[in-house]
Each structure stands twice: as structure tokens, then as C-alpha cells.
Amino acid sequence: MTTTRPVAPPASEARARVRAVTQRYARRGGRATVRGRAYPAYLVALFTVFYLVPVVHARSTSPAPFSVSSVNFSAGAAPLVCALAVAVCWGGQLAGRFWGPLVVQPFLLHVLMSTDLSPAHYLGTIARRRLAYAGTVTLLAVCSAAYLATDLFDRTGTALPGLAVTAGISAVAAAAWLWGQVRAVRDNFLLAGAVGASALVVAAVSGTAPDGRYGHWLAALVPALLAAAIGPPAFRALPSIDLARLARESARASQARAYAWTGTLHHALDLYRPEPRGFPSALIRADGSLRGYLAQGVVRALRTPGRAAAAVTLLPVGGASLTHGAAGSGGGPEWWWWWAAGSFGVYLGSGWVGETWRGLRDELTMAPLFGERWGGLPARALAWPVVAVTAGTFLGGALVALFRWPLPAGREGSTVLLVAGSVVLVLGARFLREMKLHLPLELLLPVITPFGDLSGLRVVAWQFDGIVVVLTGVALMNAVPSATGSAVLAVCLAAACVGAGLRRTGWAHRGLLARLRRG
């Protein structure tokens, strides 16, 4: 008895069949319309005219905030570029695990999976095209950031190595993005460890060179070699990709895209939140009573270990950057950037310390189910986030004060006030963001101005209201000359955020006071 094996079609025939399926799918409504492309182009034009052009003009007529000429670029380039390449590689791997370049429309993927074509035939073209887009966007973003923040491109001696470095980092970002999706978790951990160890070795070797000679070209060569090392193995893994997992990722991405287009971005992000697991009875003591508020928060945080690990990393790092910027506030724009970056890091970490924020929102919005009585609701839900964020931030600040950047003389008290005010502001902004429900209908009403309808900007501001509050609040605090005034301003902004968050859940001021009296 003989068995027949399916014969793989030639590459040219496979390419033609994939193109035919894609064209037929596009005629079913999968192709973007002219009107669908017009609105994003309109927002990009507004951003370019009202933000990008003035910023570029101001940069061209003023000195850069960070001067590369003030340091030995050849000597210090390799360690910095190695650290940046490691961060980009790890970030690309992480992004690929959630939303990789092979995520396509579920219907189109189902049609292609139902054929006799190898996954390399219909996924290879998609991967190459999207990696080219990702590399180009990363290159433009990194070059723009370097031009606006430094004087790297002001001289030929640093412009050519800088362009080579940004090109290598862009290639690393694209290759790591594909690697994170197509390779197993073990391979991703091995790559992350190998890249980190290699970066340490290269940075140490570059420091031993006399006068840092050829350090900038070494910094340009390292990302290029890294991209060449991980790119081909990632493409060779396409034939053995787990199509069932890819189908699940595509379905989740399609649902998240629908949520984002309908204005509920937080619902789209909720699709990527890890499911709590483990510790089913850890909230209850042996005698049947509930554990304390802090113990409950710790247990709920440990049920999502990935998010808890990210919070443990972000909070001290953000606290260190926040303390460093607050200690030198008023000394120049570079200090404000440290302050804003640290506050943003603490804001992200505050949302990853546990699931108690969501529990508080559910109990506030479903009063008929949980009852009208407050009791210990605020203390039970907010005890762990407040303690964890405060402890993590001040731990990072203490490390800065002790080891790295000694605080300027006479600024110890003002620095503590500014850091404490920033923490209060971040907690208020996080409360405002976590109490968000559906998109308010009034945001969809047109806002007619001489420059056109700006209702889209209101929707964007509503989607990222917590980040807007943090960055705006830090800018206002930096503008206030007194540290005490800055702290009072932060407390007022946080109180306004709490009030707005309570209104979002239906707890108006008058009803809130009545419920508190009944509680």
C-alpha cells in the first residue's frame, strides 16, 4: 500500500495564490476606504502643523538640551548604545508576545490556513512588509528624538555614526518583534539573557580601548550584528509556527481593534490583562476570617506575577528618576524631563501593583449588587496600592540620595515635598483612569474651530487622561517657584481627579455624602 504526500507548490505559484486570496478578501470589505484613511491623515496633519513644526523650529534656533560635544562621544557611545539596544530588543520581544507582526484579520487567516500552502508562503510576505514598516517608523522616531534632544546631527563627525547607530537599533527592534512572536518562551528568555550578557561584555571591552578610539563605530556595529543574528532564525521558524495560537492572537487583536475604534480603549487593553491564577484560599485565615487589607492586596498582586514583577521594577526606577529630577528642578529642561519620566514610570507601576483598582471600580459601579454601605471599601481597596506605590517610589529616591546623585545642599526638604506631591498626583491620576467606564456621548459632538473639527483631540485626551494629568501636573509643579506651593497644587489636582473619578462611577457629591452618613 502506498501513500501520497501533498506536493508543495512552487514559490511563484504559491505567491500568486496568496495574492489572489488577499485580493478576494479585500473586495469583501477588508480594504481600508478613502474616508477611513482621511481621518487619521487629518489628525497627523494637525499634529504636524501645531506641534511638530513649532518644536522643530524652536530646536533649530536654540541650543540642544543635551550636548553630545560636551562628552567624549567615542568613549561613551558603546555602553550607551548597548544599553539602548538591549532595551529595544527586550521591548520588541515583549511586544511580539502580545501583538506581533503576523497578527492578521481572523477571516483571512482562516482562509489561508484552510489551504495546502505552507505558513512560510503566506506569512513570510506579511512579516517582511510589516518589519520594513516597523524599522522605518523606529528609525524616523529615534532620529527625530535625537535631533530634538541632542546636537548629535549638528556635526558630520557625530552625524554619520549616529545615523548608523539608529539604523542598527531600528533593525534590532524589527527583528526582535518577529522573534518574540514566532519563538517559544524559553527561546525568548535565552535570547534576552544572551543579549544582556553580550552588551555587558562589549561595554567592558570598549572601555579598555585607549581614549575610547573607534568606540562610536563599535556602537554602530553591535546593533547591526545583533539584528543579523536574530533575523534569519526568526524567519526560519515561520513553517513551524503554532497556527492555533496565532488564530487566538488574531481574534483577540481584532476584538481589541474594534474596541479601540469605538472609543473604549481601556476595554481593548483589558483583553491583554493576564488572568489571575493561584492562591485560591490565601485570602482567608485558618479560623475563617479575612486577612488584613495589606495582606489581601499582596495576595491579589501575587496572583498576576508578571504584572507584579513589572511594578516592582518600575516603581523604584521611576522613584529614582523622579527624585533626581525634583532635586534639580528649576535648573533647566533636562531636570523636568527626568521628573516627568519618573512620574510616568510611577504612574505605570501604580496600575500594575494588583487588581484592587478594578475591584474598587466594580464595587462603586454595582452598588445594588454589593450594597449601598461603604464600610471599609476605600481602605480595603486603596490600602495596598497607596502603600506599595509610596514605598516603591521612596525606595528609589533613597537609593538616589545615598549612592548615585547626592542631593544639592539645602534642597532636602523641598525634594521630599516635591516627590510626595508627585506621588499624590500620580495616585489621583490613576484613580481617575481606573474609574473610567464607557465613552461619554458628548465627546463625539463636533468642536468647530477655524482649524476644523477638533473633537478627535478630545477623544484622544479622554483615552489617555491619566497620562495627560500626570505630565500637565508635573509641568505646573515645575513652574511654581515654591516647593510647598507645588505640593499643595499636586494635592488639589489629585482631589479634583478623585472627584471626577467618583462622578464617572455615579457617586455624585450629594449622593456620596448621604451614603457616607448611612455607612
Image (tube, rainbow, N blue to C red):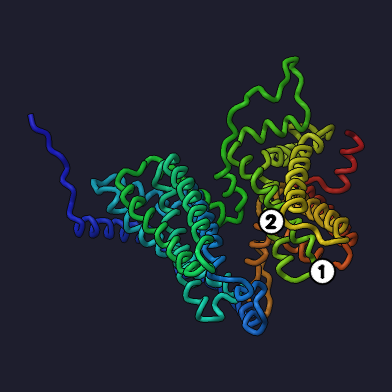
- Residue 407 pos. (x, y %): 80, 58
**Residue 111 can be seen, yes or no:** no
Q: Position of residue 452 (x, y in %)?
A: 63, 76
Q: Relative to 259, is 1 on the left or the right?
A: left
Quarter of the N terminus within the rendering: top left
Could you tell me which quadrant the C terminus lies in? top right
Q: Which amino acid does label 1 sit on?
A: Ala
Count neighbours of disc 1 (C-alpha within 10 A) and say few if under 14, some if 14 to 19, many if 20 or more: few
Q: Earlier in the sequence, mark 2 or mark 1?
A: 2
Q: In this view, does 403 lie above or below 211?
A: above
Residue ID at (45%, 52%): 100
The label on residue 479 is: 1
Q: Which residue lies furthest to the top in this view?
A: 287
Q: Residue furthest front?
A: 210
In this view of the protein, can residue 338 be seen by the observer?
yes
Q: In this view, does 126 lie to the left or right of 401?
A: left
Q: Residue at x 81, y 45 (%)?
A: 507
Dot 2 amino acid type: Phe
Helix, strand or loop status at disc 2: helix
Image point (53%, 50%), residue name = 256
Measured along the vertical axis of the image, is residue 229 above or below residue 138? above
Q: Tell me the SS state at disc 1.
A: helix
Say above or below: 74 vs 25. below
Q: Name the residue furthest left.
A: 1
Give the residue number, with chain letter if any, for mark 2.
344
